[in-house]
Amino acid sequence: MFEIIHSKGKCDRKTLKRYGTSGFTTVEGITGILNDVQEFAPAPVYAMIIGSHGMGWLPVDGTQADSLFRMKKHWEYQEQPLTRYFGGLTREFQTDVGTLARGIVGAGVKMEYILFDDCYMSSVEVAYELKEATRFLIASTSEMMAYGMPYATVGEFLLGNPDYGSLCEGFHDFYSTYEMMPCGTLAVTDCSELDNMAAIMKSINDRYVFDDSLQGELQGLDGYTPVIFYDFADYVLTLCSDPVLTARFREQLERLVPYKTHTGKFYSRTKGPLPIHTFSGITISDPSTNPMALLKGTTSWYKATHE
């Protein structure tokens, strides 16, 4: 753990504590690190930025994780422009979203925001898992280019009282003119609105079952075959034909995702640039038939909206 100090016109890094390699992907390890943060840097409000590989809600262990390691992954397409990836390729260096959430809650902290500078983390399953750990989730629905968040452009909007609208505008301004690959998506989710959205989705799921023959008509936001991460609104508005329920859904979605932005296309290392026809800022895996999504029924979101 280190502190960045600006002194005499330059930045210095002050080491506060050194950690071993064991336990940092566990609930107890995360809680311990955050307890140290509160000891070294007491503050009324905390936020968290995570730069790493991201695969949404997909669990580290289980049948679906095994499928993940058999299937060629988006970061393995070396001949294509790079997208965001940090950290290890093996499970001992990976953490489930639920583990992260419990580790944060265990430290008695609720973040102002968690920003995932990663791929595929703006999903309703991820947000629901983190709703007790953070007020806002900032993330991309799709792959994040290797450059990551353009902090030199948008960093000021993350400090003090965050300006999420300007953050999204700055992100779009940067990536719409990014020479390497002008593609990017970003959204801000208000996690306090998730319970209300789950209640609406429970009402919809109690009445409607998705017609799998329509899967190909949905807006996918990844390059996998079959798609894992679908646009949330496109799925729901295809699933549900009741005008009262769809109106409630639309109104709640505006509250759930108050800020979002995207370029005309999103980028996938497996398939290159792909068009965005509709974009709600958040994904869902309910209609996915990809083997990697086999455990979607075990997520807290799925249980809250189907059981």
Image (cartoon, grey):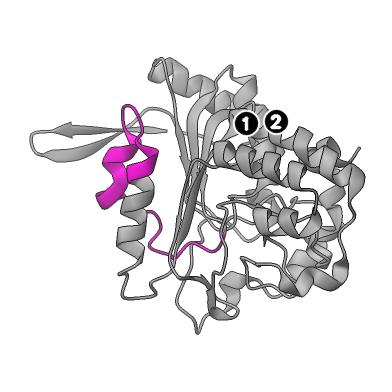
Q: Mark 1 points at which residue?
A: 193
> 277 or 63: which is nearer to us?
277
* Kind of element beneath mark 1: helix
Q: Which amino acid does label 2 sit on?
A: Asn
Is residue 128 toward the left or the right of residue 304 in the image?
left
* Kind of element beneath mark 2: helix
234 versus 6 height, above or below: below
275 versus 152 height, above or below: below
122 versus 196 height, above or below: below
Tags 1 and 2 touching, CB below 8 Å: yes
Packing grade of label 1 (10 A; few <14, some 14-19, many >=20) is some
Q: Measuring from the top left, give residue 124's x and y in whole percent.
A: 67, 45
The residue most toward the bottom is: 79
User: Which residues lie in the magenta part?
Assistant: 142-166
Q: Which residue is drawn at 30% across and 59% down?
A: 173
State the CA–CA distance, disc 1 to disc 2. Answer: 6 Å
The residue most toward the left is: 8
The residue most toward the front is: 243
Q: Measuring from the top left, give residue 294's x and y in whole percent.
A: 86, 58
Quadrant of the frame with the N terminus: top left
The quarter of the picture where residue 220 lies is bottom right
Q: Which amino acid does label 1 sit on?
A: Glu
Q: Which residue is drawn at 31% across and 32% down?
A: 159
Mark carried by residue 196? 2
Packing grade of label 2 (10 A; few <14, some 14-19, many >=20) is some
Is residue 41 toward the left or the right of residue 280 in the image?
left
Q: Measuring from the top left, give residue 59's x and y in whole percent.
A: 75, 50
> 58 or 194: which is nearer to us?
194
